[in-house]
Amino acid sequence: MYWVFGRPVSPTARSLSQNSFLSGQLSHQVFFFFFVLFKSYRALVLQILW
């Protein structure tokens, strides 16, 4: 959502649902990226330790 002077620009319900959907998709992509990063980092640490 775009905020101008502390108030939402498009305060309709449809735009709110679209923005929440987009933010949900973005957070899911970020979570997946961190999950893959953690898996590869753990594999690297195991290679170093063993």
Image (cartoon, grey):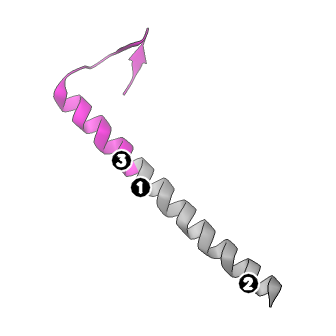
Taking the magenta stretch, the answer to whether it contains residue 14 is yes
| Secondary structure found at label 1 | helix
Q: CA distance from mark 3 to mark 1?
A: 6 Å
Q: CA distance from mark 1 to mark 2?
A: 27 Å
Residue 6, by quadrant, is: top left
Residue 10, by quadrant, is: top left
Mark 2 residue crowding within 10 angstroms, few (<14) / some (14–19) / many (20+)? few
| Quadrant of the rendering where the C terminus is positioned | bottom right
Location of residue 18 with respect to 36 vertically, above or below:
above
Q: Which mark is residue 46?
A: 2
Give the percent coordinates (x, y) of residue 32: 48, 63
Give the percent coordinates (x, y) of residue 33: 53, 61
> Are the residues at dot 3 and dot 1 in contact (C-beta closer than 8 Å)?
yes
Q: Which residue is found at the position 43% from the left and 8% from the top?
A: 5
* For residue 17, side relative to residue 47 (left or right): left
Residue identified by numbered label 3: 24
| Secondary structure found at label 2 | helix
Give the percent coordinates (x, y) of residue 46: 73, 84
| Quadrant of the rendering where the N terminus is positioned | top left
- Which amino acid, by three-letter code, is at mark 2? Leu
Give the percent coordinates (x, y) of residue 19: 31, 35
- Which amino acid, by three-letter code, is at mark 3? Gly
Mark 2 or mark 3, which is nearer to you? Answer: 2
Location of residue 29 with respect to 45 vertically, above or below:
above
Mark 1 or mark 2, which is nearer to you? Answer: 2
* Residue projecting furthest to the front: 49
* Residue projecting furthest to the top: 5
Residue identified by numbered label 1: 28
Q: Which residue is found at the position 29% from the left and 44% from the top?
A: 21
